[in-house]
Image (cartoon, rainbow, N blue to C red):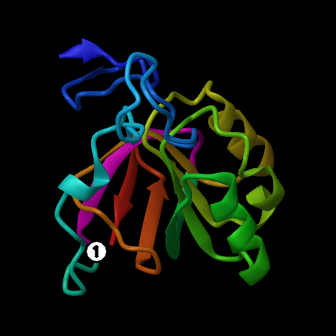
Amino acid sequence: MHPCPTSRRPTACGCTGSRPWKTPSRPRSTNGPLISPVCSSPSLSSLPAVSAESNGVEIGRGTKVFDAEPVRGEWRMLVTPDDVLALMDTGADGVVAGVADAGATFLAPIFDELRAVVCLSGTPRSHIGIVSREYQVPCVMGSVLTATPADGDDIEVDCSGDDGVIRT
């Protein structure tokens, strides 16, 4: 394991340090095929999917940003600014946003509409943690998910205990 340059946490993900929102690029030494960027967070695609029968089951845990009562909303994984633009067209009311990078600023246009934020990296002092506290949007930072919610799944974010907990 090595400290990942993006999340600064030890990881065995094979991270190259690329940012997930950057466009794939060619390696400088060859003219070969495009190389896809690799996210520093554990791959969500390698986690089991959330099943419909798993209501109330914990699927993740992390550091809560502030005390807040449990909230429920529709899960949406937001990776690029284009994902936020698409969400702006349909409305972000009641959405639980999942993001990989704690420094992502592309949530700004919809932050006041979000029900909660689940960030796969960072701490409460990271950009998303600070903004969520300002907007009083419940937020769990440095989340470790044991199952992958699909876009549209009903998810609960509970910041009322010692840790932030994500449930189906």
Q: Residue at x 58, y 54 (%)?
A: 68
Q: Up-down: is 131 above or below 139? A: above
Residue 47 is a magenta residue: no
Q: Up-down: is 137 above or below 95? A: above
- Mark 1 lies on a secondary structure that is loop
Please state the horizontal and vertical placement of residue 27, each as a whole percent of the image.
Answer: 42, 24
Q: Quadrant of the C terminus?
A: bottom left
Q: Residues within 10 Å of mark 1 (few under 14, many from 20)?
A: few
Q: Is residue 48 left or right of residue 82?
A: left
Please state the horizontal and vertical placement of residue 140, each as a whole percent of the image.
Answer: 49, 45
Q: Up-down: is 42 above or below 56? A: above
Along the viewing direction, whichever of 108 and 155 lies nearer the viewer: 108
Image: magenta residue range: 56-67
Q: Quadrant of the N terminus?
A: top left
Q: Find disc 1 in the rendering and name its residue.
A: 56
**Marker count (numbered):** 1
Amino acid found under the numbered disc labelled 1: Gly
